[in-house]
Image (cartoon, rainbow, N blue to C red):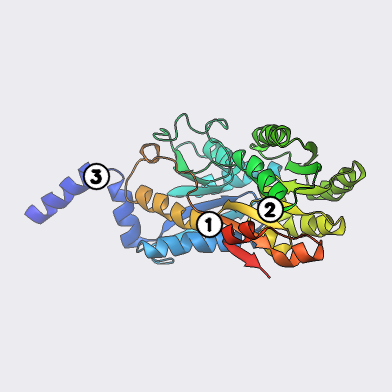
Amino acid sequence: MNNRRNLLIVLGTAPFAPRALFAQAEQPVLIGWLHFGGRNSQRSLLAALKEGLAALGWKEGSQFRIEDRAADGELGRLASLAQELAAKKPALIVAVSLSAATRAAKAAPEIPIVMVAIGDPITAGLVTNLARPGGMVTGLAGFGAELAGKHLELLLAATPTLKRIGFLASLPSRNRAAAMEAARRSAAHYAVEAMFAEVASPEDIEPAIYRLAKEGAQALVVLQSVLLAEERPRIVRLALAQRWPMVAGLRSFAVEGALLSYGSNARARFRRAAYYVDRILKGAKPGDIPIEQPMTFQFVVNLKTAKALGITIPPWILLHADEVIQ
């Protein structure tokens, strides 16, 4: 009798405890996953989230399962996919990108959202404060616009003779306007000309590259967005055809053939997202968990591309690189 009474006291006082305890005891917890990009690109990110959950003691299949939806870079599909996930009544939704988080929050206002995004969630209207977000949205975000200036700085350090820089931006990106403004400020600081091309779909990319080439661009900076990350093989191929040195945020751009990449470690961010999932499933309120900004960055130099373009990378840059692709 005393044991039963003690159990009732625990269940009655711990926040979200009944759901967490019984979900693990009787059936796996359902976790939603909403990704703006395609299924192929999300595999490594989803795998990183699962690795993080495993490290925290969660077993896939017996304790949790993931219901995933991917928009394949089509912004118009996000709202319906978010509604599909909301109808499944998951314990929480992991939203990849600010756009995905916004759609998920609208479709499922009572369901916790763990976002993993580039950009400012305050500007996007998702939260009012990073330290204490309130509401149902938390996770990792930030350092989208700020990187545009850093990318230009690194590109000019590697190739100081450049005078006309092309910037490729994605119209679906909520981070676009701030990133473009940061790029303009940085270009003015370094006394180079900034030229912008904006794309709304994969089909827009090739004409945008050709337009920048026609206008005299000598290099390319890819502003961060899920759409452009999805299309990185196409973008790198087109840039190399113009013999442009190129810099972007994701390491995978440099692996594909971009001269440089500098940005947050994507897999580390998704492993860290598991911490948020774990906290919420154990009863924490999402609005009480501070939103984190990226702490781990990777700087990659593709020396093979440098040689192909006839560029001599200064030794100090190679010394500061986390990885040099030969």
Circle 3 sits on which residue?
Answer: 14
Image depth: mark 1 or mark 2 in front: 2
**The residue positioned farthest toward the bottom in the image shown:** 326
Horizontal placement of 293 versus 196: left or right? left
Question: For the residues marked 1 and 2, what is the alpha-carbon distance in whole angstroms?
Answer: 23 Å
- Tell me which label, 3 or 2, sits earlier in the chain: 3
The span from disc 3 to disc 2 (Cα, nearest Å) is 42 Å
Label 1: element kind: strand
Between 307 and 285, the residue placed more toward the observer is 307
**What residue does disc 1 label?**
67
Q: Is residue 73 visible?
A: no
In front: 179, or 260?
260
Say which label, 3 or 1, has the lower sequence index.
Answer: 3
Residue at the location (44% across, 54% down)?
272
Residue at numbered disc 2:
229
Where is 321 relative to 84, above or below? below
